[in-house]
Amino acid sequence: MRLLIRWLISSLAIAAAAAIVPGIHVDGNGVAVVAVMAIILGLANALVRPLLTILTCPLVILTLGLFVLVINALSFLIATSFANWLGVGFYVESFWDALFGSLIVSVVSTVLSMFLYDEREPRYVRRM
């Protein structure tokens, strides 16, 4: 159940990025395209992003972590190119559109995930 909720949050975040950034286009059935793109982006973040982070570790350290934004944009572009290869219908025009899109996806996902209750996370009650 939790995986489906995370997938829904990711889909909503990608839809928000497509609505806000003018260089991100969704063709065909928008709901299906965004849902498939959420799966592809999740796989890219799980498989490609750690490799990119390890390979560019000196740049991440040198820029005090700001290079992670570039890694997010590259991961977004890789996921988009894989979606285009599959014929999904999700297009990003440039690197800057991918950068802004990945920022929006990150912010919206974080904000929506704040409303999830995690039973594994301890809740501390403040006693008076």
Image (tube, grey):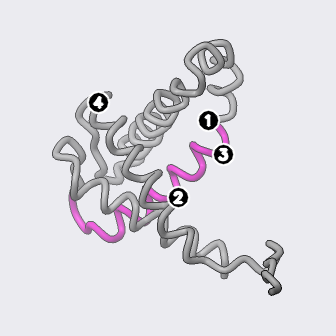
Pick whichever, 125 or 32, lies toward us: 125
Specify which label sits upstream in the sequence, 4 or 3. Answer: 3
Q: Quick check: marks 3 and 1 in contact, CB under 8 Å?
A: yes
Residue 91 on image: x %, y %: 27, 44
SS at mark 3 in the image: helix
Is the stretch drawn in magenta largely helix, strand or loop? helix
Q: Quick check: marks 4 and 2 in contact, CB under 8 Å?
A: no
**Label ID, residue 49:** 1
Residue 38 on image: x %, y %: 47, 59
Q: CA distance from mark 3 to mark 1?
A: 6 Å
Which residue corresponds to the image point at 55% horizontal and 18% vertical from the top-left?
63
Pick whichever, 83 or 118, lies toward us: 118
**Amino acid type, label 3:** Ala
Specify which label sits upstream in the sequence, 1 or 4. Answer: 1
**Amino acid type, label 1:** Arg
SS at mark 1 in the image: helix
Q: CA distance from mark 2 to mark 1?
A: 15 Å
Label 3: how many residues lie within 10 Å, few (<14), some (14-19) or many (20+)?
A: few
Does 55 appear above or below 9? above
SS at mark 4 in the image: helix
Q: Which residue is mark 2?
A: 39
Q: CA distance from mark 4 to mark 3?
A: 22 Å
Which residue corresponds to the image point at 65% horizontal and 18% vertical from the top-left?
61
Q: Quick check: marks 4 and 3 in contact, CB under 8 Å?
A: no
Going by the image, does 5 lie left or right of 14? right
Residue 46 on image: x %, y %: 66, 45
Span colored in magenta: 27-47
Q: Which residue is mark 4?
A: 96
